[in-house]
Image (cartoon, rainbow, N blue to C red):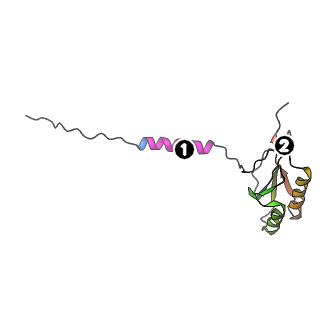
Amino acid sequence: MKFGSSERAPAEINLTPLMDILFLVLVFLVMTATFTRRTFVDIDLPRAGTGAPEGTEPNVIRIDVDADGRVYLEGQSVGLEGARQWLLAMPRQGAMTVVLAADERTPHGQVIQVIDMVRESSITRVHIETVPAPAP
């Protein structure tokens, strides 16, 4: 007399709850992460006690100047003249702002040349990026 079958139902693992948890963890990480705009230009920014953090203004152009005086526009090496031509040819979309990040070892004259070049292109808002100084 056979009352039941000796065959067992195959084991089944339900992955749906695991996927739900992994999705929630991913959403949590994305929502809490801080995204900062970093460039590939190796520069040591000067320290300033009164520096303000970079805002979220629209129409921002980033110009970097390394210690050797090379000029980078949005992370690409273009030189001073290349940046001038790009800024003059760029279509205007309201008030434009330039964020200038110059290495602390960059000669002062090179920084002034970049600021002057920006103002020649009729952009008057120039922010100089710094690192907050440690509290005394």
Pinpoint residue 88: horizontal percent, then vertical percent: 83, 67
- Residue beneath label 2, please? 46
Quick one: label 2 or label 1, which is nearer the N terminus? 1
Rendering quarter of residue 8: top left
Residue most toward the top? 136
Rendering quarter of residue 89: bottom right
Q: Label 1 amino acid?
A: Leu
- Quadrant of the image containing the C terminus: top right
Q: Is residue 78 visible in the rendered structure shown here? A: yes
Residue most toward the left? 1
Left or right, residue 25 beside residue 71: left
CB atoms of marks 2 and 1 within 8 Å: no
Q: Which mark is residue 15?
A: none
- Residue beneath label 1, please? 26
Q: Nearer the viewer, residue 93 or 49?
A: 49
Report crowding for label 1: few under 14, some 14 to 19, many 20 or more residues within 10 A (C-alpha): few
Residue extent of the magenta highlight? 18-47
Pinpoint residue 112: horizontal percent, then vertical percent: 91, 54
Does residue 24 belong to the magenta stretch?
yes
Query: Does dot 2 land on a helix, a strand or a loop?
Result: loop
Residue most toward the front? 68
Pinpoint residue 29: horizontal percent, then vertical percent: 58, 42
